[in-house]
Image: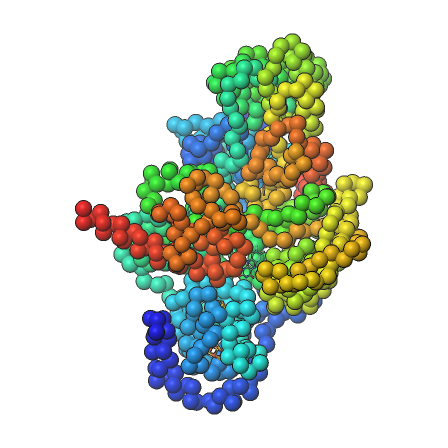
Amino acid sequence: MTAAKEKQQQERNQEWRTELRKAVPNKDRLAIERVKMNEVEPHERNKSQNIEVNRGLTPEQAQREASRCMDCANPTCIEGCPVSIDIPRFIKYIERGQFLNAAATLKEFSALPAVCGRVCPQEKQCEIKCFYTQKMKKAPVAIGYLERFAADYERESGKIQIPDVAPGNGIKVAAIGSGPASLSFAGDMIKFGYEVTVFEALHEIGGVLKYGIPEFRLPNAIVDVELENLKNMGVRFEKNFVVGRTATFDDLKELGYECFFIGSGAGLPNFMNIPGENLNGVMSSNEYLTRVNLMAANQEDSDTPVLRGKKVAVIGGGNTAMDAVRTAIRLGAEKAMLIYRRSREEMPARVEEVKHAEEEGVEFHNLANPIEYLANAEGRVAKVRLQRMQLGEPDASGRRRPVPIEGAIDEMDIDIAIVAIGVSPNPLIPACLPGLKMTRWHTIEVNEETMQTSIPEFFAGGDIVRGGATVILAMGDGRRAAASMHKYLTDKHAGKENK
Amino acid sequence: MNKIVEKKQLSENVFKFVVEAPMIARSRKPGNFVILRVGSKGERIPLTIVNSDLEKGTITLIVQNVGLSSGKLCQLNQGEEITDLVGPLGKATHIHKVGTILALGGGVGIAPLYPIVEAFKKAGNRVITVLAARNRELLILEEEMRQWSDEVIVMTDDGSYGRKGLVTEGAEEVIKREKVDECVAIGPAIMMKFCALLTKKYNIPTQVSLNTIMVDGTGMCGACRVTVNGETKFTCVDGPEFNAHQIDFDEMLKRLQAYKREEDQARTGKK
Ligand SMILES: Cc1cc2nc3c(=O)[nH]c(=O)nc-3n(C[C@H](O)[C@H](O)[C@H](O)COP(=O)(O)OP(=O)(O)OC[C@H]3O[C@@H](n4cnc5c(N)ncnc54)[C@H](O)[C@@H]3O)c2cc1C
Ligand SMILES: Cc1cc2nc3c(=O)[nH]c(=O)nc-3n(C[C@H](O)[C@H](O)[C@H](O)COP(=O)(O)OP(=O)(O)OC[C@H]3O[C@@H](n4cnc5c(N)ncnc54)[C@H](O)[C@@H]3O)c2cc1C
Ligand code: SF4
Ligand code: SF4
Ligand code: FES
């Protein structure tokens, strides 16, 4: 048995857990219906970018939902979580009413539970592995909602625990980029006693959490609390600093930085390279979302403009596409259309976002692929030509491949098109490190266990290693990189002393 | 941080700022630019680094007041701070010794041309500079350009100074007069388009520095895309300098108007 499993068992065998299990018979637990998230009504929320759709659970709702969990002897849910959170432990603390202990449990595993509780694709990770889904063919325990509840409770109680920080060891390390990968890396390294600086190119800290994911799904205030905690622990943030440009790695080494964590993300937007894509009114989802989320272009007093279309087409089926199309509705679009080349079942977006988008009035145009944009007399986009598709044989990813239906081409009137077909790794850092080993997909090659790159003092994680992935995976990478960088530096410095 | 240590009015609508930015001053090369923001609700706007002073740790920016954000910058005074400033961004100009360089600058484009002229001269080239402005009052940096040019020809639209005519007319005379090995042209997009047509006729390799609309300046948004040799490029990371003969200027001219309505509304306060 691994150490983690042993710890889980020990925790599970605690008296209070055993008693709690006995307190309610499993058949009663099974009879409880899964909690419904409290939401703001679609007609209310679709007018403002700043209304968070999910309102969270009340303590009563959370405790009731927590009591559905059967505290399984073999908790398969944990296998679904990329950072192996001890899910039954935190849930049982909620059932028992010890919400702060639940939050503390989460913090053992995750640096950003309030974020992951909101944005993890739970239905594909922890919840799909829940006993309820696997064996009972019932709705799983709402692990994500409960995670969010515990983290929110802790934050709102004003009793956020600042973890203990080891005495400073005077060793300087740097994180490049300030997305979830770097933030979790920084949190762990500061605990180990390092001097940590996070460098960010933009004028805000947080990476995609700030410039990409909109306020209605993840309020900035939630991210800011986490940033404040990191600052209080001693992490330094340098914004408006492009590593490789403002200063080179050699410059940073000269300033005393010994090791680097690269968490520069996958910020490069993909386009389809079809005719008319550079017309005015056609833009990447990154541009659209950045203007609104980072630059607050939706607000009266912001200097940054954003195009407000009446007929907005968003191309893609992932979270980014969903965020863009729902933003368009909030900016006053009369028709907000999602154009996706496969069918709804294949959409990579979180199921909850697809549901919310539909409730808010998004039109789904599935099995359609843009092949050309056409302009009006002023040279602005006015129409998109769509190739209709059907599903063929499954491809390498196991999803059925969309194939064009010959001759089935039609046109749709639009005044804005937003291209959200994925991102590529940001090439800036690799370009400054000629010796760095890269993969065919232009991601950085790392040892999967240690997250160390081909250059020993460089570690990497998050989207720059995985391509467009998820917050929780980025966060897990950051933590693993911190653990192995700590080991690397400890060995290195021990070696020095022995000499 | 980013304190304005000197401000000077160069012409009716053009101001020079010397700003504290020691890291950028140290790292910047000719052709690089910065992105800055004025105020907590400010827009991110790109400006070329015209000069830097390593000892003082400052960079020089020259900005023309054309709209809301450039206007906000122009209102700042010595001693005040620029909210956010990041750089140096973009690829540096490829400076080498080729022989004779023809440098063409129009309007505020003369500012970004200045460090390039200086660098080409320092690399041992003969540099002939043609500067163009609508009238005498709008001409900037003439003295500074003379310092690094073997010859400076001034053209004004109204003939109020130098010679009457467009930058291309002055350029063509030089090309007809002597062998030009390379050309650099910076100014309004329409001027660069005509300079490119001219030098193409004479087969002179030509670089232009594009002033597309930008947001992040790090390759993340694609607002700055241009078509170069049939391929989409991002001006902020693949440029801002490109081979002039390969650029789809008509597309670029249209793209500069992408937010025209919104910009006009912003200027008149009716967002
Ligand atoms: C619109 C959108 C919605 C999403 N929704 C979800 C979701 O619901 N659930 C989910 O799990 N995932 C979602 N994702 C994916 C998730 O956000 C990413 O996987 C995650 O943020 C990656 O984290 P990261 O730390 O690797 O990098 P990022 O968050 O991408 O941050 C990288 C940062 O590095 C900075 N940087 C880059 N180069 C440099 C440099 N040279 N110097 C200094 N700084 C630099 C960048 O400016 C950026 O801020 C979404 C992504 C987008 C775009
Ligand atoms: C790499 C680069 C370097 C630049 N260097 C300089 C410089 O050294 N000095 C300088 O004065 N300007 C420079 N510019 C142009 C400067 O960024 C714009 O003038 C500024 O962003 C306009 O913003 P605004 O809000 O004041 O005007 P807006 O109100 O946004 O626009 C006013 C008018 O200017 C035009 N415009 C908008 N954006 C741009 C733009 N990016 N470039 C050109 N015209 C634009 C529009 O067509 C509009 O009609 C540079 C641009 C780039 C991309
Ligand atoms: S971090 Fe994500 S996957 Fe893990 S338990 Fe929480 S919601 Fe589930
Ligand atoms: S599998 Fe489901 S029921 Fe079992 S411990 Fe995990 S969350 Fe609870
Ligand atoms: S300005 Fe955003 S990619 Fe160039």
Residue B115 position within the rendered picture, expressed as x and y whole percent measured from the top left: 52, 24
Of B185 and B56, the residue lying toward us? B185
Residue lying farthest to the left in this orientation: A499
Is A159 situated left or right of A292 in this image? left
Of A222 and A488, the residue lying toward us? A488
Is A494 situated left or right of A192 in this image? left
Residue B102 position within the rendered picture, expressed as x and y whole percent measured from the top left: 60, 17
Render colour scheme? rainbow
Residue lying farthest to the front in this orientation: A393
Is A129 situated left or right of A310 in this image? left
Image label count: 0
Q: Residue at x 51, y 30 (%)?
A: B92
Indicate the quadrant containing the N terminus of chain A: top left, top right, bottom left or bottom right.
bottom left
Q: In this view, does A413 lie above or below A107?
A: above
Q: In this view, does A420 lie above or below B24?
A: below
Residue A47 position within the rendered picture, expressed as x and y whole percent measured from the top left: 68, 61
Q: Which residue is drawn at 43% across and 86% down?
A: A21
> Quarter-wise, where is residue A256 in the image?
top left
Q: Residue at x 69, y 32 (%)?
A: B249
Of A221 and B148, the residue lying toward us? B148
Residue A417 visible, this orientation? yes
Q: Is residue A231 above or below residue B110?
A: below
Residue B103 position within the rendered picture, expressed as x and y whole percent measured from the top left: 59, 19
Residue lying farthest to the top in this orientation: B177
Is A391 situated left or right of A1 in this image? right
Residue A333 visible, this orientation? no
Q: Residue at x 54, y 20 (%)?
A: B117
